Amino acid sequence: MPARVNYEGRVFGSLKVLSYAGRHPKGGSTWLCKCAVCDSEVVLKAQALYNGQQTCSVRCGIPRSNKKRAKHGMWQSVEYHTWHGMKMR
């Protein structure tokens, strides 16, 4: 088993890693993080942090210009793009 990378104290975008939260049931480690944008705490897999997740959720990280589109939080889904394409046609 490879050694666990210590993310404690590191900052990823608006997420600050507070402490190790244990192993994920499907493998990998999880970390307790605090979001500077909405001031909430969330447990994330190390893989998400490594891959560049910078906010606690999709809604939290939406720029101000996208707030109108993000009313329901599904604006990046395949279904939304299909529906939007139908409306445009």
Image (spheres, rainbow, N blue to C red):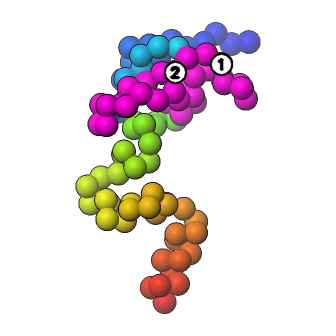
Q: Amino acid at mark 1?
A: Arg
Q: In the image, which disc is placed on residue 23?
A: 1
* Left/right of residue 58 with respect to residue 27 in the rendered view: left
* Left/right of residue 42 with respect to residue 69 in the rendered view: right
Residue furthest to the bottom: 89
Decide: few, some or many residues near mark 1? Use Cα within 10 Å; few <14, some 14-19, many ≥20.
few
Residue 45 screen position, x and y as percent: 57, 28
Q: Nearer the viewer, residue 52 or 31?
A: 31
* Left/right of residue 36 with respect to residue 3 in the rendered view: left
Residue 51 screen position, x and y as percent: 52, 35
Residue tagged by mark 2?
31
Residue furthest to the left: 64
Stretch of the chain drawn in magenta: 21-50
Q: Residue 50: tell me if it is visible.
A: no
Element at label 2: strand
| Residue that appears at 38% across and 62% down | 71
Q: Amino acid at mark 2?
A: Trp
8 vs 33: above or below: above
Q: Nearer the viewer, residue 79 or 7?
A: 79
Q: How many marks?
A: 2
85 vs 10: above or below: below
* Left/right of residue 17 with respect to residue 86 in the rendered view: left
3 vs 27: above or below: above
Is 3 magenta? The answer is no
Mark earlier in primary sequence (1, 2): 1
| Residue that appears at 42% across and 20% down | 17
10 vs 65: above or below: above
| Residue that appears at 37% across and 31% down | 40
Is 45 magenta? The answer is yes
